[in-house]
Amino acid sequence: MNAEDPEEPEEWESPPRTFDLRTAFAIVVVVLAGAAVSFWLVSTRSNPAAQSHPPVTATGPRRPPCNDNELAMAGAFLVCAHQVSDPASACTVSGKSLVAVSVISDGVSRYILYVDGGTDYHGPGSYVLQPWPEGTLGDHGGPVKVALRTYARGDLWTSTSGRLDVAAGARGGRVTASLAPARTDAGRALALDGSWTC
């Protein structure tokens, strides 16, 4: 550069490049980790059951980990439910008659559990559950049976097999049952396992 020639621009050098392969790799890792965390947050917030209960496996539903005083429901939904105070709950126990209507909740939704001793009930003990005769909800004859209805929508599942244990006092016990949807459009079958009270 000539000091007497003011029109000639000075040449300048570009700053050294600091963007190398290690920096590119670090950026990719951070972006992927952020995407994974975002996906996990969205999926658990849109599915509250995924936050506290295991997923349904390819071979069938697993029983959710419930407390001793709860009823596990697996299949159509995967929740633990406990009895709640509700005017719809009722319990009629006298001699050889047992009719229990118990409102239960998983903390989000409410359900109605029906336990019907039918004409086979003879007091506290263990009973083999029979299929609930079609169209007989509210008709207390026939075999010992159970049913479950969603409180808000009214979807109904009725027993197909299982076991009902009635404790002394006949106001509770244990149930292990397979239930089928009463209507074909109600969804998947349902398994019950755990405590019931009225």
Image (cartoon, helix red, strand yellow):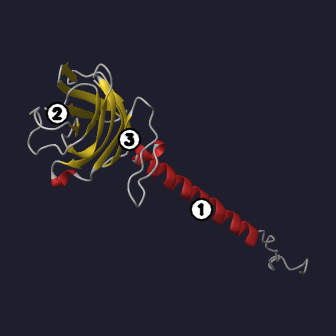
Q: CA distance from mark 1 to mark 3?
A: 32 Å
Q: Position of residue 148 (x, y in %)?
A: 23, 39
Q: Tag 3, which secondary structure?
A: strand
Q: CA distance from mark 2 to mark 1?
A: 62 Å
The residue lying toward the viewer, choosing from 23 and 78, is 78
Q: Is residue 8 above or below residue 59?
A: below
Mark 1 crowd level (few <14, some 14–19, many ≥20, 10 Å Cα): few
The residue positioned 20% from the left and 27% from the top of the image is 122
Q: Tag 2, which secondary structure?
A: loop
Q: Is residue 23 above or below residue 117?
A: below
* Residue wearing tag 2: 120
Q: Is residue 9 above or below residue 167?
A: below
Q: Is residue 24 left or right of residue 195?
A: right
Q: Quadrant of the N terminus?
A: bottom right
* Residue wearing tag 1: 32
Which numbered disc, 1 or 3, marks the residue that appears first in the sequence?
A: 1
Q: Which mark is residue 79?
A: 3
Q: Nearer the viewer, mark 2 or mark 1?
A: 2
Q: Position of residue 198 (x, y in %)?
A: 27, 23
Q: Is residue 29 left or right of residue 94?
A: right
The residue lying toward the viewer, choosing from 125 and 185, is 125
Q: Position of residue 31 (x, y in %)?
A: 60, 61
Q: Is residue 106 left or right of residue 189?
A: right
The residue positioned 55% from the left and 58% from the top of the image is 35
